[in-house]
Image (spheres, helix red, strand yellow):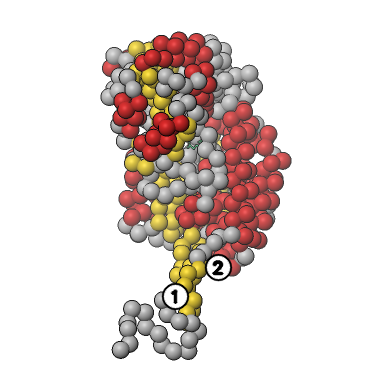
Amino acid sequence: MKKEYTIYINGKWTPSTSNKTFNTTNPATREILATFPQGTKEDVLKAINAAEQAFPKWKKTPAPKRGEIILTAAAIMRKKKDELGETVTKEMGKIIAEGKGDVQESIDFLEYIAGEGRRLFGETTPSELVNKFCMTIRQPIGVVGCITPWNFPTAIPCWKIGAALIAGDTIIFKPASMTPLCGAKLVEIFDEAGLPPGVLNFVTGPASIVGNEIVENPSVKAISFTGGVSAGIDVYSRAAKHLKSVEVELGGKNPQIIMDDANIDLAIEGVLFGAFGSQGQRCTATSRLIVHENVYNEVISKLVKRTTALKIGNPLDPSVNVGPVASEDQQKTVLSYIDIGVKEGAKLLSGGKKLFGGIYDKGFFVQPAIFEAIHGMRITKEEIFGPVLSVMKVKNYDEAIKIANDVEFGLSSSIYTKDVNLAFRAIDDFESGITYINAPTIGAEVHLPFGGIKNTGNGGREAGTSAIDEFTEIKTVFIDYSNTLQKAQIVEE
Ligand code: UN1
């Protein structure tokens, strides 16, 4: 049963000025789930106007009150967790446990950030002059644009929207065109939670029209974007013309190192989850496994055995371990990288094939692939965003770290070892925004900062306490109660 959605402006579901629509489909079955408008520049202008009108009142609303609305949204989401989790799975293809996990991450973040309404801390510090008081306060930025990806279709929008709301900003939300239904359901929840009209506006449509207008319109003061590197660079440079505050969260090529003293079975569990969870479609997915030569053969044989036993099928079936990739294009990209790997001379140890028969003929399934690879091959350097793992053998820790760091990205990293000294060295040595010891490269927790270095981002961090930095301006305030003109830096003789 498909539903026809409109855009959401000023608290109302409103027809787009365009009569063109697009479908969102289930990647496991190709069933059409809903249709959405191909939004236009005019739609975005209306959304911006609504957000600008709503801003003064929202800014004046006490932050704890803003937090109450966010908490109400979290409570509604908790009630709808199963239903929303199913929507995530149907629209994006991750298995149902992960679909519900996506929603749980959204709830966790909203609950966390709602409490920030009673903090939003500034600083106080002594003045260099007598009878003068100094402090900083946080103020909202204004209208902000949240442009979100399809791989975490509820969690990542909630990281951005939740933080912008508590900060007092008003929002233009553009979801990925592959997962607008999850986006629309979030908007419905915020609407039900009592968000005032105009505070959150939702426009679907192409990045080249809707996205570009959000990024380039001078009335949108800040942009928060998660997606691929080339799109991120494009967003960053377009927004730079207006000196906007921009945060981009981009790709990864995340390594897991297994040392020879590691708990091998645990390390295998970790890599299976990190590499093939969500079909490898996470920025934090493990795409490189770097293994000490002393345990290499054991790791390979156990890993291949476990991977070939994974059940691939309809992600709504709780017994399935691996669902489809998110679209036909994704499937093509993944299969083309498998081809590239084979042509480069990497040894395909298991998987990597398209599947046929039954549901496989309809959906975009690819068997999880394990390559024995040599560092430097394209499959070891480029982000594939699919269930493809390159395994590399190393002689020692130094070689492992060198390979781990020799990529353009720096999001997540992991090492399995029982040697505490080595673990601490790795914390220093990994070039990444996130490091895990004896845990996979995935599984960020919402109350800690999330983001990366190198080509993974432009220096900001989402979630945790840093979420507020992205969506607030700092104002420095001086209060002189001396009744005299006091001059900083000027010494009166
Ligand atoms: C992403 O991959 O885009 O670390 C975000 C994780 C998630 C967040 C990933 N909680 O697995």
Q: Residue type at mark 1?
A: Ser
Q: Residue at x 41, y 25 (%)?
A: 257
Q: Distance between the residues labelled 1 and 2?
A: 31 Å
SS label for mark 1: loop
Q: Residue at x 59, y 40 (%)?
A: 105
> Which mark identifies residue 175?
none
Circle nearer the viewer, 1 or 2 = 1
Residue behind label 1 places its C-beta within 8 angstroms of ligand 1? no
Q: Is residue 34 left or right of residue 146?
A: right
Q: Which of 197 and 124 is in front in this view?
A: 124
Q: Where 69 falls versus 399 (above or below)?
A: below
Would you say the residues marked 1 and 2 are in contact, meaning their CB atoms lie under 8 Å apart? Answer: no
Across and down, in percent, residue 297 comes to: 41, 11
Q: Report whether residue 483 is seen.
A: yes
Can you identify the residue that label 2 sits on?
56
Across and down, in percent, residue 311 comes to: 56, 15
Badge 1 local density, few (<14 within 10 Å), some, or many (20+)? some
Upstream in the sequence, badge 1 or badge 2?
2
Write down the quadrant of residue 130 in the picture. Answer: bottom left
Can you identify the residue that label 1 sits on?
127
Q: Where 96 falls versus 349 (above or below)?
A: below
Q: Report whether residue 25 is seen.
A: no
Q: Where 308 falls versus 407 (above or below)?
A: above
Q: Which of 369 and 444 is in front in this view?
A: 444
